[in-house]
Image (tube, rainbow, N blue to C red):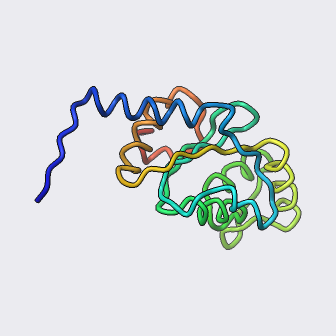
Amino acid sequence: MIKYKLSENELVQITNEIEKNLLDKANRLKFTYNTNWKENFPEAAGVYAAFENSELIYIGQTSELRSRMSDIRRTYNHTLRKKIGKREFKGVLIKNKFSEEIEEKLTQYMVENISFSYQEISFGRLEVESLLVKNNKNKKLLNANSVRGLK
């Protein structure tokens, strides 16, 4: 077995650099609902951040950023969309989806208010995501409370 030893200082430095890149306004991509939306993202593993206007609201990780950003367009595929629908429109999920009316309002809301940034990371995504969620737990993140350091 190969063991890599990074000091806590090195881990903090790496995580801080990733967080700085994610939070940088220059790196944000405004959400659009067209099928080309996902083309803004690489076919690579990474972490991503979602912003409502300028406020950080979600941190996630994925093995494939492009595919995940395609998922964000469908309620049944992404927690963030579900949480925004419940919060903004008092939506009730039926078969992991909202009514057609709420889905349309939710899409429009996201187009008007949501943006994303990402950072490619080939390994350690879960650990980085957990540290970023923990570092930002004082914010009103929409991440599930039972995971990633929000308990």
Q: Position of residue 93 (x, y in %)?
A: 70, 64
- 94 or 56: nearer the viewer: 56
Residue drawn where x is 72% and y is 45% of the image: 29
Residue drawn where x is 17% and y is 40% of the image: 5
| Quadrant where the image shows the N terminus | bottom left
Q: Quadrant of residue 95?
A: bottom right
Q: How many marks?
A: 0
| Quadrant where the image shows the C terminus | top left
Q: Position of residue 127 (x, y in %)?
A: 36, 45
Q: Is residue 72 left or right of residue 122?
A: right
Q: Position of residue 65 (x, y in %)?
A: 56, 59
Q: Is residue 10 left or right of residue 125?
A: left
- 145 or 2: nearer the viewer: 2
Residue drawn where x is 69% and y is 33% of the image: 26
Q: Quadrant of residue 91?
A: bottom right
User: Where 139 falls versus 28 (above or below)?
Assistant: above
Q: Position of residue 103 (x, y in %)?
A: 81, 62
Name, please, the residue furthest toward the bottom.
Answer: 95
User: Where 42 falls versus 12 (above or below)?
Assistant: below
User: Where 21 falls versus 75 (above or below)?
Assistant: above
